[in-house]
């Protein structure tokens, strides 16, 4: 059940300006709470709140179900916080560049052994996804079908597995 009145969300999705204004006012405390949890700085949190309210007002019509508004808002806030962090730090922060250099400069034979060890250290559900994607070169949809999982679950597992491999290699 949605924490926001379904009829208000439906009216706002239909373009009712007063419903949109009321929904923006009603959602703002939750958006602010999400942003404070998701962003690194208070300034970023406030920027994320404003950006999320703007996204909500512009893209509300694309929301498929009124009951999913809270989850959608949380996703938008998280993405805004990530975008703001990337903008502040840049994709290639000095630390990330140093880490990449450490990996690139390793002898190939040593790196292969370490990558194999990293893959072996993964929990089974992560290891399976990495092997299917990177060794068997299956698509996300093919992996999802084989594992009887959703695309989103496969993508999340693959992302987490690759993060764990990177951490293992840099440890």
Image (cartoon, rainbow, N blue to C red):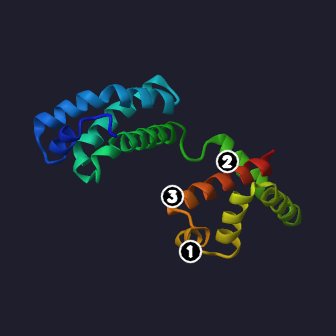
Q: Quadrant of residue 157?
A: bottom right
Q: In what quadrant of the picture does the C terminus appear?
A: top right
Assess disc 2: are there few (<14), some (14-19) or many (≥20) residues with their C-alpha within 10 Å of its C-alpha: few
Decide: is 82 above or below 26.
below
For the point 34% across and 25% down, which residue is it?
29
| Residue 119 position (above or below residue 37) | below
Q: Residues within 10 Å of mark 1 (few under 14, many from 20)?
A: some
Helix, strand or loop at label 3? It is: helix
As helix, strand or loop, the secondary structure at mark 1 comes to helix
Residue nearest the observer in this picture, 151 or 159: 151
- Horizontal side, residue 101 vs residue 116: left or right: left
**Number of other residues with Cα within 10 Å of mark 3, as a class: few under 14, some 14 to 19, many 20 or more:** few
| Residue 142: mark in rendering | 1
Residue on which the image places disc 3? 152
Q: Position of residue 148 (x, y in %)?
A: 57, 67
- x, y percentage for residue 45? 43, 28
Residue at 64%, 69% in the rendered image: 133
Is residue 55 toward the left or the right of residue 140 in the image? left
* Residue that sits furthest to the front in the current view: 1
Q: Nearer the viewer, residue 73 or 105?
A: 73
In this image, 150 relative to 122: left or right? left
Give the Cα separation between the discs numbered 1 and 2: 33 Å
1 or 2: tag closer to the N-terminus: 2
Of residues 85 and 65, the one nearer the viewer is: 65
Identify the mark at residue 97; answer none if there is no mark.
Answer: 2
* Quarter that holds the N terminus: top left
Q: Position of residue 78 (x, y in %)?
A: 46, 40
The residue that appears at 73% across and 47% down in the rendered structure is 99
Would you say the residues marked 1 and 2 are in contact, meaning their CB atoms lie under 8 Å apart?
A: no
Is residue 44 visible to us here? no
């Amino acid at each position: 059940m949605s924490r926001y009145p379904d009829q208000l969300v439906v009216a706002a999705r239909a373009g009712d300006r007063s419903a949109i204004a009321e929904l923006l006012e009603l959602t703002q405390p939750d958006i602010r709470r999400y942003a404070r949890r998701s962003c690194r700085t208070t300034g970023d949190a406030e920027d994320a709140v404003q950006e999320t309210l703007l996204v909500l007002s512009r893209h509300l019509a694309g929301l498929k179900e009124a009951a999913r508004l809270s989850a959608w808002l949380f996703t938008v806030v998280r993405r805004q916080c990530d975008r703001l962090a990337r903008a502040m730090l840049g994709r290639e922060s000095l630390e990330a560049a140093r880490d990449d250099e450490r990996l690139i400069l390793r002898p190939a034979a040593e790196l292969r052994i370490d990558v194999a060890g990293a893959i072996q250290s993964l929990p089974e559900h992560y290891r399976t996804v990495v092997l299917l994607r990177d060794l068997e070169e299956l698509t996300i949809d093919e992996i999802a079908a084989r594992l009887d999982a959703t695309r989103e679950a496969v993508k999340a597992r693959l992302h987490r597995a690759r993060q764990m491999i990177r951490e293992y290699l840099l440890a």
